Amino acid sequence: MTKNIKKKEISEENKESAKQISKDEKFDATFAEKTIKKQEAVRKIQLTPQEAYRFFQEEQHKLEHLNEDLERIEQAIFEMDKTIFALKELKDAKEKDVFINLGNNIFVKAKVEDTENFYVNTGTKAVLLQPTAKIISDLEKKKTSAIESANKLHQLQTQTQQNLDQLYRYLTQLQQKERMKKDSA
């Protein structure tokens, strides 16, 4: 009797295993069919040489703009770092002589009376007096945001460069096929 129960349990387990294997096989077959269909669809999408070349030029143009944008952001980050450093250094410069850079290597000697507050240009021809700590905090936030933007631009650069590489290979293949046709004719 226990043998019959065990046989039934084993046969039920086998049935479940067989069902699972069958499901897996169906899943694998469906997955394989979908993959093949996708590959066929990709093969059907062929750019003409003119379209590929135009797309290549667009991607080159995009990469140039990304490089320019990234350069501006990196310059802004550098300027923010310099400003933060200067503000922190000025805390210890109260009532001391400092040199203020007016540009083009022209400096003026001055005494800083207040190192706890500085005037900030709001961009609307208005200037606000703000505490040094707030200014540094705001600059740190802007810097963090700029770094995030730079990272996104780096990702876009990489993606665009990969697109360019693929297009270049495709255009090279088209040129080789064209040469082979001319040589065989």
Image (tube, rainbow, N blue to C red):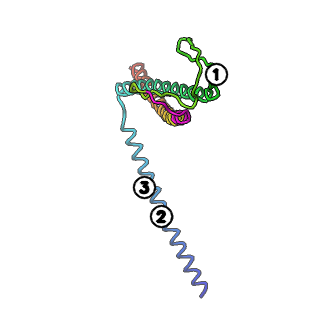
In primary-sequence order, the first of circles 2 and 1 is: 2
Q: Which residue lies under the disc numbered 2?
A: 22
Residue 74 in the image: x percent, y percent?
A: 52, 27
In the picture, residue 87 is in which quadrant?
top right
Three-letter code, disc 1: Lys
Looking at the picture, does residue 105 appear above or below residue 140? above
Q: Residue furthest bottom?
A: 1
The label number, if any, that marks residue 30 in the structure image: 3
Q: Position of residue 154 (x, y in %)?
A: 51, 32
Question: How far apart, in angstroms, are the residues tagged by discs 3 and 1?
Answer: 78 Å
Q: Is residue 40 left or right of residue 137?
A: left
The answer for how far apart the CA atoms under marks 2 and 1 are is 84 Å
**Residue type at tag 3:** Thr
Quadrant containing the N terminus in the rendered view? bottom right
Label 2: state its secondary structure: helix
Q: Which residues are magenta?
A: 127-138
